[in-house]
Image (cartoon, helix red, strand yellow):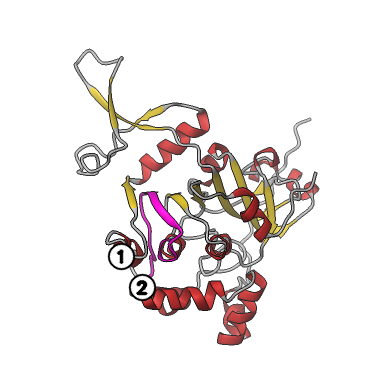
Amino acid sequence: MSKVTSLRDAVSRNIYDGDLVYTSGWQGNVPYSASHEIIRQNKLIKLISGASCEIGDHLIAAGCVDEVYLSWIGNDATKGSHAIRRALKGIPRKLKIHDFNNMTIVSMLLGGYYGFPFVPVKGMVGSDLIEYNEIIRYTDNPFSEKDEETPVVPGIQPDVAILHVQRADEFGNVHRWGALSLDEIAGMAAKRVILTCEELVSAEIIRNDPNRTMLPGLKITSVVHEPWGAHPSHMPGFYQSDWDYRINVSGAASRQQESHEAFLKEWVYNIEDRNDYIEYYVKKFGYSKIEDLRLKEPILSSSINYGWR
């Protein structure tokens, strides 16, 4: 059965107030379009991410997040999250923060993927992250002859994972390349997965390169064909990061709550969908601006032979 739907329906049917939502990407492949739809629908979520870039900033500034599990958040073009700083003061709403290092976020999601109740972690030992994190517990090490306690974190299964990928078929089978970040682990751990893709292709194309399949269709609940869905981050094989926009538009606006709200009104609330977003971008900056972001010269991998008999 085809899982293709609109982004509006995918967010409406899969994300509920109070859900723990994972957002994909590591500077690239970031699901900006889906995050903007969450804001338009005024959802109130808990956010978990390895490196959510500006979308975490936007969701917090819009008042759509009241709790975060994070190792990094903010606009890497402006070096920080101004929205999260304001939220610590209750603007626009109070935010509960669980701060981890990168490997601990990976460990929690990996624990959720495998169904483990908890996972031992040692990467934060010696830092004050443990002291100020109420989630971390200690347990005895059954394999040590010493009286040794090991820090542990819970395995986490997000209610929803939102992943932006290069291509998928209508059944949700996913091709992804480049930096995979935590996305494969999070997708397998999540209870529901919303997939947005640059290209919607035939199942035959997916089957022709099975080792590039990041997730099987049985894990996916909704597939959305969403070209430019990761803009202004980069998308390997399609477009580069829009640093001018990230620094001088979204980045500059994020420094104050009033300007951030004005940015959200202009680029999110007044925009109907991603097609409308791109049309508005072209109207404001010119067609040549977005064409400059599109990758012109492909860097192709070598062909391989799957034959075995």
Identify which residue, 272 or 214, lies in the foreground.
Answer: 272
Say whether disc 1 or disc 2 marks the residue closer to the N-terminus.
1
User: In the current view of this chain or complex, which residue is farthest to the top?
Assistant: 145
Can you identify the residue that label 2 sits on? 257
Q: Residues within 10 Å of mark 1 (few under 14, many from 20)?
A: some
| Quadrant of image for the N terminus | top right
**Tag 2, which secondary structure?**
helix
- Relative to residue 72, is residue 217 drawn left or right? right
Looking at the figure, which quarter contains the C terminus? top right
* Residue 219 belongs to the span the image colors magenta: no
> What kind of residue is marked 2?
Gln
Q: Residue at x 56, y 64 (%)?
A: 230
Is residue 192 visible in this depiction of the protein?
A: yes
Q: Which residues are magenta?
A: 60-77
Q: Amino acid at mark 1?
A: Arg
Contact (Cβ within 8 Å) of mark 1 with mark 2: yes
Residue 301, visible in the rendered structure? no
**On screen, residue 278 above or below 133:** below
Image location of residue 307, percent across then percent down:
76, 36
Quadrant in the rendering for residue 60: bottom left
On the rendered structure, is 80 left or right of 31?
A: left
Quarter assignment of residue 293: bottom right
> According to the image, label 1 marks what residue?
86
Task: Give the Cα separation between the discs numbered 1 and 2.
Answer: 8 Å
Q: Secondary structure at mark 1?
A: helix
Residue 15 percent coordinates (x, y) = 57, 50
Q: Nearer the viewer, residue 98 or 261?
A: 261
- Give the x, y percent position of residue 126: 19, 39
Q: Residue at x 29, y 63 (%)?
A: 85
| Residue appearing at x 68%, y 56% in the figure | 9
Task: Count residues near mark 2 (Cα–Cα under 10 Å), then give few for <14, some for 14-19, many for 20+.
Answer: some
Q: Position of residue 263 (x, y in %)?
A: 46, 76
